[in-house]
Each structure stands twice: as C-alpha cells, then as structure tokens.
Amino acid sequence: MSAAEALALGKSRSAPKAVPAGVPAAAPAPADTTTTTTDTKSTPTSSINIVILGGNFAGLGVLHTLARHTIPALQHLSSQTTSSSTQYQITLITPNTQFLFVPASPRALIQPDLLPGGEAKVFRPLSDAVKQYGDLVKLKQAYAYAVDRTNRRVHIRHVNSHWSGDGMLVPPEAASTVSYDVLVIATGTKARSALWSMPGPGSEALKGAEEATRREWESIRNKLRNLQSGAHEHHDVLIAGGGPVGVETAGEVASWLKAEGKTEGVKITLHSGADKLLKRNCGEGLGRKAEEYLRRQFGGLVEVVHGGVKIVSVSESGPEAGDGEGETTVQLSDGSTRTVALYIDATGGQGNADAFLPKTWLDGSNRVVTKDAFFRVRGSSESDPEAGGIYAAGDVVSGSDNTLIETNFQVPVVCSSIGADLASQILGPDSQKNGVKLPAPLKQKTFKNKLAGTLLIPIGPGGGVGQILGWGVPSFLVKVAKAKTFMVDMAEPAVTGQQWK
C-alpha cells in the first residue's frame, strides 16, 4: 500500500451497512451527490453512485451504455417490482478535458494534414459526451490516487495539483473523495511517452492531460522539420518499438520525408527489442510482411533492427527539446550507444492502475486481474469482499490485446454485469425464483471477441499489411479501410454515444 493510499484510508469514516452477499453495497454519499431521502408521498428513495475512472474509449463506452440502456432498464424494473425508487448518479473521473482518438495518433503526429478535418478530428471535448445526460452524469477533472475499498470511496486530486518531494499534495485542498456503489476502472495503459496516452509523462499540474500529448507532438514535428537544417551533426531517426504503433510511425515518418524531399543523409531505424516485428499481436507471417513492405516502399531509408537488444536508457542533450535542435543518446543492452536527431518512443505501455490499487489486484504489467469472463474484478483473492461492485474495462484489463476491437466487445459485457448485479439488488436474494423477466440490458452477456485475429497496419498513406480473422489481406484493402483516414470518422460517435445507441 502506498503512502498516499495509507493517508487516504486513514481519513475514512464509518463502514457501510450490510447488504446481500454478492451485491454492491450503497456507500455513504459524498456532499455533492444525492443521499437517501423520503419524498412527499413517503416513497422510499435510495441512491446508486456509479464512478468511472478513465475518459477515453472504454470509459466513455461504459458511460454511454449505462446512461442509455442499463439505468433506464433498472428504473423500469424497479417501478414494476417495488414501491421504492432509486436515483442514479454517474461520475466520470479523468485528468483530460479532451478525448483522444488514439488509433490515429501516428498519422496525427507526423502528417495531420492528411486526416479529414486535421488534428481537430483527433481531439474531441469530453463535454460533448456528458452534457446530453444533464444531472445524471458529472465530469470531474482529476486523478484517482487511492481507493478505500472498505468504505467505498475514491480519493482524487485535482488535475492542477502535484506531489511534492516529501510526498505531500500541493495544494492540499486539491484532494477530495467520491463515494461509489459501483466502480469501473477504465484507465487504460500508460506509455513511456505522452505521445500515445493520456495521462502521460509530463502531464502533472497541466490544465488537462492532453496538453502533454500536444506538447510532445509539436516537439517531434519541430525536430522532423529540422533534420537537415545543419543545427547538429546527426540526422538519423530512431523509433523504438516493433508493435503496430512503431511500424505505423515508421511508415508515416518515411513517407513524409519522401514527400518533402528530405531523405538525403537520413536513416530511419525501427528498433524492436523482440526477435521480430509485431510479435505480441499476431503470428510470424504478418511481422515478416511488414518488414518486407517497409523495404519495398522505402528502400534503404528504413532499417529494421531486432534480435533481443533492448534500449536501456535515453538521455536528451543540447537545447530544449521543443525547439527542434536537441539530440538524443540511446544506450543499448549490448553496451553500445547511439546518438540521433530524433528519437520516438513507441514501445508498449503498462496498465494504469498501480497509483490507486494494491499490487495484489494487478498482474505483472499493472493491469487489473478479473475473476471471470464478465470483467468483475478479482481483488486479492477470488472471494475478496473488498472487490464487490468493482469492474474493469479496456486496455487496463489483464490479458487484453490492447485493441479498440476488443474494447468494443468488452463494453456491453461489463455493463451487463453491472446491470445484472444491480437488478439482483432490486429483486432481492430470491430473484432467481420470483419469475421476473429481465430486460435485455440486465441480462448477463458473455464476452467473445468475434474479430479476434484482425489487425490492419497502415505503413504510410498508400497501404500496409493486415489480417482479418487471421487471414492475410492485400495492401489496397488496408489503404481503403484504414491507411487513407486512420478511421478518424469513428471518433465523433465514440464521444457522442452514437456508437452505443
């Protein structure tokens, strides 16, 4: 348990009331949420506080599905089976004010003018997601730093705050708590660079986590424009990471340099710490095809290096990174070093849950371990009572393949688990015997990735490599399906909820 978590738990108040086994308990409501009351007709009224951590694909998908389908179904069930009513409150907690369409990041980073609508299509205001639901949904721009699993409270700090060297929060009044009956962890992964994730390194004390991403993007663009300016002796580009993002970024950089006529004296190295490209995502064939495609399209401009040599450390030198004139020295695990004009870290990330959950709840990559195929969180053990009412969705789930495809199949299952558990609370312990027919949103769904083995990887605007359900597809199909637009038209329905209508 971290010092911050211990401090937070030390401030907790009384324990919650007992509830039927397996059913999320109603937490003491915070000052800014609805509490249990009695209306003028003496109709018992209770409250259910649903807290979602994370405001990108998984978090928004869960929010929209709950608000559009699950909660209306629960309200209908309650009106048909009980004399009481329940007020629901969804609180979305995230440090960013903007939704980032991550799949388009390699194109937006290097060649945003090629995207329909430009960079503006990649960033979308989160307010567009929540304003349609009125008082049902609250948006809090904050970081979660501890979860009091006994008293069911999430301890958060405002996005403009930071931890001092002695572990104190600055300013101290930036801390607050939000009570939950249902907690959904959808915080995704955190990369070593803010290029691909929010929040990322350098996002502390900013107006929004997306500002760190925008700042990193502009720094990369400046360095790319100045590759041949004569400001330094090195003109090479090193891209670390042999997964989809690394391969796509190599294709974007190479195609931009060719289009701008700036290839002379420049070498792009795509460095994979594995023994082949795309090792984690597919079979050996697609990685080999990606390497062949890079060689065929760009010749000696792109060099692919793999074989187990890993990057140990990275250090910046020269002027400030943002002015485009600094250099980067990379130390490799074989003892060698290399200095380049532009270094892009596209290595994979780790789960973004270690700041507020105990290590016993996470796997070796800090992703949340679930106890079943329905995304209920396991906790420290299969029968851990502190994990009741807690669910996980998206890339933060242990075993996730970190694709948007899988997240889209996860979301309905997570919401059905929440709906089924809350329906059980409404109907009581004999819900299996009373013959009530549950509406579809409250019936437990089973997870299945119906598009497993599907991966499309643009390598520049002209095409790329890919497979659908494990079967290879030609480059022109990759061009039509993804390389032309990087599917950026999917951003708006993900934010507005039209994807989940």
Image (cartoon, grey):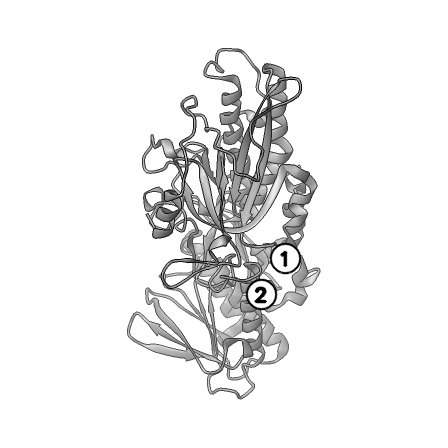
Residue 231, x across and y down, in percent: 52, 87
Judge left or right: residue 30 versus residue 259: left
| Rendered position, 356 above or below 290 | above
The 10 Å Cα crowd at callout 1, few under 14, some 14 to 19, many 20 or more, is: some
Q: Looking at the image, can residue 351 be seen?
A: yes
At 55% across and 73% down in the image, what residue appears? 219
Give the residue at mark 2.
Answer: 214
| Rendered position, 221 above or below 420 | below
Toward which corner of the image does residue 220 lie, by quadrant?
A: bottom right
At 45% across and 39% down in the image, what residue appears? 153
User: In which quadrant is the C terminus drawn?
Assistant: top right
Q: Circle 2 sits in a helix, a strand or a loop, which is it?
A: helix
Residue 54, x across and y down, in percent: 52, 47
| Rendered position, 131 above or below 297 | above
At 38% across and 41% down in the image, what residue appears? 369
Judge left or right: residue 114 versus residue 347: right
In the image shown, does 217 or 304 lie closer to the viewer?
217
Q: Looking at the image, can residue 464 be seen?
A: no
- Which kind of residue does numbered mark 1 sit on? Phe
Residue 23, x across and y down, in percent: 45, 25
Dot 1 and dot 2 residues touching (CB under 8 Å)? yes
Residue 405, x across and y down, in percent: 54, 45
Give the residue at mark 1.
Answer: 123
In the image shown, does 49 or 41 lie closer to the viewer?
41
**Residue at the limit of the structure toward the left, as seen here:** 335
The 10 Å Cα crowd at callout 2, few under 14, some 14 to 19, many 20 or more, is: some
